[in-house]
Amino acid sequence: MEQTKSFNLIEQAVTSYGLDFRSLEIEPVSLTTYGKHGDVHYKILIDGHPYSIRLLPEQRYTGSALSHSTLDTLELQLRYTDYLRTQGIPFMERVKPMHEALFTTIIDSDGQNWTCCLFRWMDGHHVTGNTRHTAARMGTLARRLHDVSLHQQEIRFPFIDHTVAYQRWLDDLQRLSISRMPESVRNSFQEYLNLTQYHLDTAQHHQSPSIQPVISTDLNSLNVLWDSESYGIPINKSSESLITNTSVQPTVYRIWLG
């Protein structure tokens, strides 16, 4: 029943883009199984071509310490991904709806509003066990993101102090009962909590309007894909991929709407 509901919702979302399609398939595993935002996110096949579709509910992160996204912020994020691609940084290509809008909005059978974002799928390989080599490449990518963003004056994201949410998460950890932990684990855990609190206090103390904020806190291994040449692992490269076999950098594919 739940799978049928998801299919109907995704079919409605694809139709809202004005695409003329004959077949629609949905991969059985959600891409956001453990997400707290309440989004519906799947890999789909439209007439055999792979896409990534993400549907955002009207209320996201219910009961979470994370900030809530707005449609204005979403517009900035989508424009920013377009800008990254013009600067040569690989990112999923956004599918443009009718009337050149950035996204579409639908209402499901229960009367709930959903914001729909559609991208062309990118094949790649996840690297979660990093080496100095891959970590250095990630750092180079982060540097490029910041460099191209410093010259972009039209897209201004709202500044969010993530230390507020981090402090809440740390407080949750501090409330855990550690009396049942082995002494060695208990001591290491307490050292970790103390070190984390120290870094939070340092970050909050040194905040200044002159500091350049980071572009995204989600630039991590789970949100980056590698091609076969840049990592040395054969993968199935599709015609939708935005990188070539001579790519020397990892590929950003999901640093938005975290």
Image (cartoon, rainbow, N blue to C red):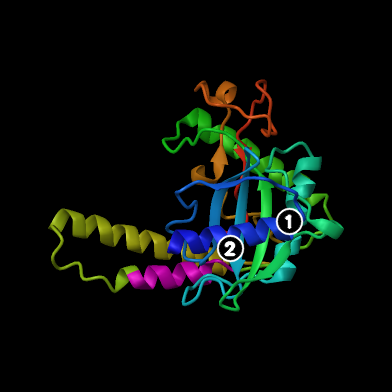
Q: Which residue is mark 1?
A: 78
| Horizontal and vertical percent position of residue 213 | 67, 59
- Residue at image position (44%, 38%) is 128
Q: Please state which amino acid type lies under the numbered disc 1.
A: Leu
| Horizontal and vertical percent position of residue 190 | 27, 62
Of pointers 1 and 2, the one earlier in the residue sequence: 2
Magenta highlight on residue 117: no
Report the span colored magenta.
161-172
| Horizontal and vertical percent position of residue 217 | 57, 55
| Horizontal and vertical percent position of residue 245 | 65, 21
Q: CA distance from mark 1 to mark 2?
A: 22 Å
- Secondary structure, mark 1, is helix
Residue in front for this viewpoint, 157 or 202: 157
Magenta stretch secondary structure, dominant: helix
Q: Which residue is mark 2?
A: 9
- Residue at image position (81%, 60%) is 101
